[in-house]
Image (tube, rainbow, N blue to C red):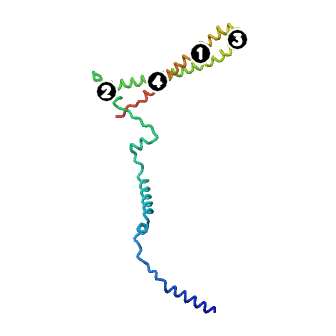
Amino acid sequence: MKSLLLAGFCLAASALIAAEPSKAPKTAPASSEETASQEDSPLVKAAKDARKNREKSRLSGIVITDDVVKNSGGRVTIVHSASLIPELNEKDEPAGEILDRMANEKSSQAAARLAADARVTALEKEIAAIEKSLGPLEEEYYEEEDPENREDEIFDRYQTAKRSLDEKKAALTAAREEARRLKEASNVVAPKP
């Protein structure tokens, strides 16, 4: 029985082998990309094209346009050059004299800016000194037992110091505004020829 079963199995296997078509080699395609593109779906083809475009854009670098500059985080200042060009007077001064006059104006602006900064610093020191002197005056006022001395002498000194402090604070505000205005005026840059 075993031999009969073995013979039947060999017969069936030989029939299957004989029925299988022969695998003859077909002509090889020119390249693997052509085969892939012939067999790719539209979605796969679009993805491959997008990847090629990305690779090309990386190699080309960044193109700087007006939109790129406007959207950048940097500071862009537009200066109208007509406002910086000095007008010639009736005598038609030579260019050297005009440049000398402009240099003198610039140096006077710098001197004014330095003087304003010094004024601000001096006022800040004066205010600090007055504020420091107000504390002991208050303590002296509350520690004084003589009401006449308290109201006449100490209160008057306190009120004088307080008025002086208020005046100095107002002057400091004005001096800071003047220093800011001078600093902004000196930040205007002349265009390069």
For the residues labelled 2 and 1, the Cα–Cα distance comes to: 55 Å
Q: Identity of the amino acid at label 3? A: Glu
Residue at the disc numbered 1: 162
Q: Which of marks 3 and 2 is in front?
A: 3
Q: In this view, does 44 lie above or below 14?
A: above
**Residue type highlighted by circle 1:** Lys
Numbered disc 1: secondary structure: helix
**Residue 137 occupies which quadrant of the picture?**
top right
- Dot 1 surroundings within 10 Å: few (below 14), some, or many (20 or more)? some
Does residue 10 appear to the left or right of 183 in the view shown? right
Neighbourhood count class around disc 2 (C-alpha, 10 Å): few under 14, some 14–19, many 20 upward: few
Answer with the quarter of the image where residue 97 lies. Answer: top left
Which residue does the numbered mark 3 point to in the structure image? 144
Q: What element carries label 4?
A: helix
Marks 3 and 2 sit apart, C-alpha to C-alpha, by 73 Å
Callout in the foreground (2, 1):
1
- Residue 147 is marked as none
The residue under label 4 is 113
State the SS at label 2.
helix
First along the sequence among labels 3 and 2: 2
User: In this figure, which residue is indicated by the disc labeled 2?
Assistant: 95
Q: Which of pointers 1 and 3 lies earlier in the amino acid sequence?
A: 3
Position above or below: 25 against 124: below
Q: Which amino acid does label 2 sit on?
A: Ala
Which-is-in-front pick, marks 4 and 3? 3
Q: Residue at x 56, y 21 (%)?
A: 124
> Do the residues bearing badges 2 and 4 touch, measured as CB atoms within 8 Å?
no
Say if mark 3 contacts mark 2, CB within 8 Å: no
Mark 2 and 1 residues: CB-CB less than 8 Å, in contact? no
